[in-house]
Image (spheres, grey):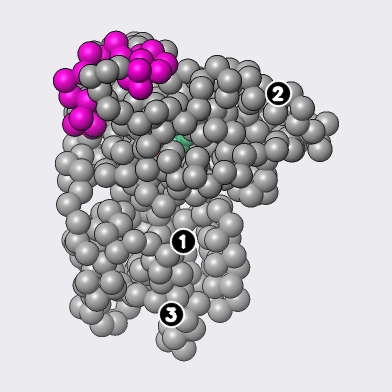
């Protein structure tokens, strides 16, 4: 048996279905896929991170007596070239977004593709309601999985130690520059391994539930990027966190299952990548300038601007800020969630199709188990509640460094101040809230 082990979003050797299920002769590979890379900015931080992670995977595979062939090009062309070498099948980890599914279908026609589920804890096709249909609401979905999250440890895949490496030229590795990308500096947490991040987080987990919304603090695990690219699997995160034992462990595990839920929703409802999950037909605002000002952080609302400016610079955004800016875009500006989703996809370091689509639909009140349309975040109240001293806003917007933070928390206060020259807010929170309520109340529901 000759197999290709195609690493994609599972850049690790631990708990790896590929390394466990493989037999006999193998050729581990990674493809820098030009169909994806060609649409990215040459300074995309994710490419630098993946590049570093792929080289590290190569090293780890070498330590197991294997290696990693690194390709640059279109997967179908690469597999067409590899086919004459006599491979029986390709082993890879499942991926459910539209692009991945279409790509895999094409590859499967060249060499049989065998897919394994090791990027998530649950297999979406297994967790159904008694009537055989999928859950659409998180809480019953989660409760039904208590047999999983109540366990102390979940089974992990073991590496098959009897694999033989197929002879090939493994030394050819394209540089980042030759692929058209610059090596860029990464936020410091990305220079840490997932295990180091868990180690750091273990001293914070007791306060996680209480502090995780305070966006100027580092009170969360920062594991999303490592999970996204599979440097650690969610099963390993689960097992490591369970070992900590303590009051707040269950709360964290529940959050981890939101990732499972959104992947489950995308698997069962693939159209939710492109359409409102609940069929609501909202008359969105088509004003391009409003959207651009949101993207650039020039809305005149200090917290929204700080969150977006910080995001544009770092590719990171705290969960609470994601909730606030997505609510502002879809409700106060009444702009289609798909535009926000695409903007996040273009920059977010932890961008993951299922979580991003699910969360954007949640914010827009068009998704599975989403926020009711009348619960609209007020960005001024949010900054008063979670950043009373304006620490986050001041750290991002230098011209507001010496401003009394009270001015951040009251609508129009900055614009009316004689001492500060700041952009006038593009919408009134009260009026835009009323407009959103009317638009959502009047929206037709094609599925109703
Ligand atoms: C509009 C919007 C877009 C989002 N887009 C993404 C995305 O593209 N990729 C992504 O991983 N998360 C996304 N999230 C969810 C959440 O913001 C991030 O998972 C979280 O901020 C990552 O930080 P952390 O690893 O420190 O999380 P922690 O609080 O430490 O949580 C641990 C892990 O649980 C999972 N998790 C926690 N909360 C959520 C959630 N609400 N939804 C899904 N998974 C969750 C993540 O894998 C996270 O790494 C989005 C949320 C919103 C509101």
User: Is 236 in the magenta?
Assistant: no
Q: What residue sits 32% from the left and 44% below the top?
A: 312
| Ligand 1 is within 8 Å of the C-beta of the residue at disc 2 | no
Mark closest to the chain's N terminus, 1 or 2: 1
The quarter of the displayed image where residue 221 is located? top left
Which disc is residue 78 wearing?
A: 3
Q: What residue sits 58% from the left and 20% below the top?
A: 431
Residue 377 to residue 267: above or below: above
Q: Label 2 near label 1: C-beta < 8 Å?
A: no
Please provide percent x and percent y for residue 262.
55, 37
Check disc 2 and report the residue beneath it.
438
Q: Label 3 near label 1: C-beta < 8 Å?
A: no
Q: What residue sits 45% from the left and 45% below the top?
A: 292
* Residue that sits furthest to the front in the current view: 418
Which disc is residue 61 wearing?
A: none
Q: What's the magenta region?
A: 396-416
Measured in 3D between alpha carbons, the distance from the residue under mark 1 to the one under mark 3, in whole angstroms, is: 15 Å
Check disc 1 and report the residue beneath it.
92
Mark closest to the chain's N terminus, 3 or 2: 3
Please provide percent x and percent y for residue 439.
70, 28
């Amino acid at each position: 048996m000759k197999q290709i082990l195609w690493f994609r979003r599972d850049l690790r050797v631990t708990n790896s279905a590929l390394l466990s299920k493989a037999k006999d002769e193998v050729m581990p590979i990674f493809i820098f896929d030009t169909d994806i890379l060609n649409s990215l900015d040459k300074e995309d931080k994710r490419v630098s991170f993946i590049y570093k992670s792929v080289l590290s995977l190569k090293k780890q595979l070498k330590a197991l007596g294997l290696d990693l062939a690194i390709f640059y090009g279109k997967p179908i062309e690469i597999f067409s070239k590899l086919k004459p070498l006599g491979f029986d099948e390709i082993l890879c980890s499942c991926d459910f977004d539209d692009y991945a599914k279409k790509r895999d279908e094409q590859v499967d026609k060249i060499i049989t593709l065998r897919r394994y589920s090791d990027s998530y804890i649950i297999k979406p096709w297994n967790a159904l309601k008694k009537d055989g249909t999928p859950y659409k609401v998180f809480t019953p979905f989660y409760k039904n999985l208590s047999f999983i999250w109540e366990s102390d440890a979940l089974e992990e895949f073991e590496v098959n130690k009897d694999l033989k490496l197929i002879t090939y030229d493994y030394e050819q590795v394209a540089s980042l520059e030759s692929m058209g990308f610059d090596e860029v500096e990464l936020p410091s947490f990305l220079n840490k391994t997932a295990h180091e991040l868990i180690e750091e987080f273990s001293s914070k987990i007791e306060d996680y539930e209480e502090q995780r919304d305070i966006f100027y603090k580092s009170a969360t695990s920062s594991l999303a990027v490592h999970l996204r690219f599979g440097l650690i699997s969610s099963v390993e995160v689960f097992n490591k966190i369970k070992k900590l034992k303590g009051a707040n462990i269950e709360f964290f595990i529940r959050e981890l299952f939101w990732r499972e839920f959104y992947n489950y929703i995308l698997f069962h409802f693939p159209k939710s990548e492109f359409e409102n999950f609940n069929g609501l037909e909202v008359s969105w605002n088509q004003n391009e300038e409003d959207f651009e000002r949101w993207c650039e952080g020039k809305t005149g609302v200090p917290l929204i601007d700080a969150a977006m400016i910080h995001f544009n610079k770092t590719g990171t955004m705290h969960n609470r800020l994601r909730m606030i800016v997505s609510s502002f875009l879809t409700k106060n500006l009444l702009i289609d969630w798909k535009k926000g989703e695409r903007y996040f996809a273009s920059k977010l370091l932890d961008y993951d199709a299922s979580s991003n689509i699910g969360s954007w639909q949640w914010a827009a009140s068009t998704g599975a188990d989403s926020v009711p349309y009348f619960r609209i975040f007020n960005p001024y109240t949010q900054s008063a509640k979670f950043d009373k001293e304006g620490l986050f806003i001041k750290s991002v917007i230098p011209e507001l460094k010496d401003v009394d933070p009270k001015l951040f928390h009251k609508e129009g206060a900055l614009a009316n101040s004689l001492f500060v020259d700041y952009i006038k807010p593009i919408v009134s929170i009260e009026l835009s809230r009323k407009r959103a309520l009317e638009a959502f109340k009047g929206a037709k529901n094609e599925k109703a």
